[in-house]
Amino acid sequence: MKQLFHLFVCLCFISAAAFAQTKDNILPAAVQIKAATQAAPAEFRDGAAVLGYNSNGELVVLRKGTNDYTCLAPDYRTPKYFAAYCYPNSLEPFMKRGRELIAEGKRKDRDAIRQKEVADGKLPMPKTPTTLFAYWGTLENLNKETGEMSDGKRRYVIYVPYARAADLGMSNKPNNLGQPWLMDEGSYKAHIMITPPLDHKH
């Protein structure tokens, strides 16, 4: 029994240390804003709203927007994959619902849940093609002055709900050629993926 108690105490300390370590990765708000807005086209960066993390690790509004774009700062809990996103505000209900379901421990079920909510008219999705911009790299290669990553790469995701690859004249298989292809075809979140070759930084 004493050994089990000691093991429990050790695990508690390990968990606390791991939590502290991840919270140490939370960057100052100004740096998060710089990193987040790097995902957006240059002309949208200054006016975009920015969601990021406070000192408690909670997702909050770091900056209110003056245009129709929202940028999401990289998640401090995944420093090995430091990704920022920016998208029109019409996609925020879809993105927000995904975050809520993950927080509820329903990551595996989130697509099925959102699909039903879209079908039931409870979750709005844009009716016209809508682009999400992604920018990712690693925390260790982040320039905290500019928000840029020396190993930064980009991806463009154009949501076209219920589209079929054949109707768009494109493949439904991924490639590393920078060619567009359709992912999740026929579904509520069908989207065109465009990923510049991974050895191309910008």
Image: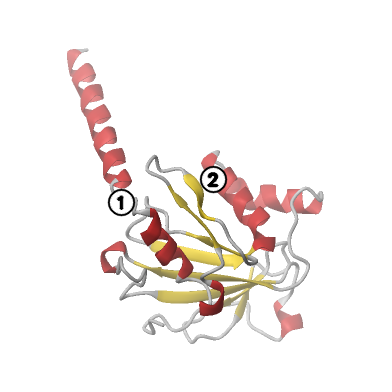
Q: Residues within 10 Å of mark 2 (few under 14, many from 20)?
A: some
Marks 1,2: beta carbons within 8 A: no
**In the drawing, what numbered circle is on residue 25?**
1
Viewer-side residue, 43 vs 138: 43
**Label 2 is placed on what type of residue?**
Ile
Residue hosting label 2: 102
Residue 51, percent from left and from top = 51, 54
Q: Residue at x 28, y 40 (%)?
A: 20
Q: Mark yes or no: residue 194 visible.
A: no
Q: CA distance from mark 1 to mark 2?
A: 20 Å
**Label 1 is placed on what type of residue?**
Asn
Instruction: Describe the element under mark 1 as helix, strand or loop.
Output: loop
Q: Nearer the viewer, mark 1 or mark 2?
A: 1
Instruction: Describe the element under mark 2 as helix, strand or loop.
Output: helix
Give the quarter of the figure containing the N terminus: top left
77 sits left or right of 93 in the view:
left
Q: Is residue 61 above or below residue 172?
A: above
Q: Earlier in the sequence, mark 1 or mark 2?
A: 1
